[in-house]
Image (cartoon, grey):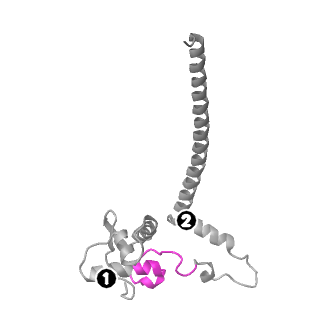
Amino acid sequence: MPSVVGLLEQRELGARRRVDELREEADRVQTELAVAEREWEEWVIARSRVGEVLGPVDETEDHAEAERVRPAEGQAEEASPASMAAKPKSQVPVWRQGLDASVLSMDYQRILQALADRHRLHQGPLTCQEMAVLFGLDAVPAKVEALRSKAKRLVARGWLAERQPGRFTLARNVTGPGGGS
């Protein structure tokens, strides 16, 4: 018959092994947590930067930048307003009467054309997922969100309307590409 001290030693040894296993597991989890936190911080920074790039443009910053870039007086070349303007079709201008959709990049024109076709056929608004399918894209979140970003920018600049969340139509008095405004 085993002694009581022997049984206690066996149980103590088992408990010590379990404690060691749990400590190793805790160390592994702590390491994974640190890696996940770093990755999460990188995504937060990336989302912030994307928000800055896709956010509305502050006209005062643009004016200050143009003043800083403008050549000093007396230089041989005079800065023309065209040379200081944004690259053609690189930005979405605010819609105004008489502004043609040709000032937009092809992606934006494509969205306007799809919605103009829907309007002409007296069909309802489109979701970004429906647009992705219509454009022959995979309706995966990355593609849909890219379209949503473009559609939201067109809404913010007056080209589109979003009367219901996530459902886009042409804004009043806006026609699609080739139709004039």
Residue at 57 percent across and 24 percent down: it is 14
Q: Residue at label 2?
A: 53
Crowding near pointer 2: few (<14 within 10 Å), some, many (20+)? few
> Could you say which is closer to the camera, residue 86 or residue 10?
10
Q: Tell me the element at label 2.
A: helix
Q: Is residue 165 left or right of residue 77?
A: left
Extreme left residue here? 122
> Could you say which is closer to the camera, residue 75 or residue 180?
180
> Could you say which is closer to the camera, residue 97 or residue 181?
181
Q: Is residue 109 magenta?
A: yes
Q: Residue at label 1?
A: 117
> In the image, which residues are magenta?
87-110
Residue 10 horizontal/vertical position (percent): 59, 20
> Could you say which is closer to the camera, residue 85 or residue 63?
85
Residue 26 horizontal/vertical position (percent): 58, 35
Task: Say whether marks 1 and 2 touch (CB < 8 Å).
Answer: no
Residue at 69 percent across and 83 percent down: it is 78
Placement of 48 over or under 65, stated as above or below: above
Q: Is residue 111 left or right of residue 103?
A: left
Of the 4 image quadrants, the one containing the N terminus is top right
Q: Tell me the element at label 1.
A: helix
- Main SS of the magenta segment? loop
Q: Which mark is residue 9?
A: none
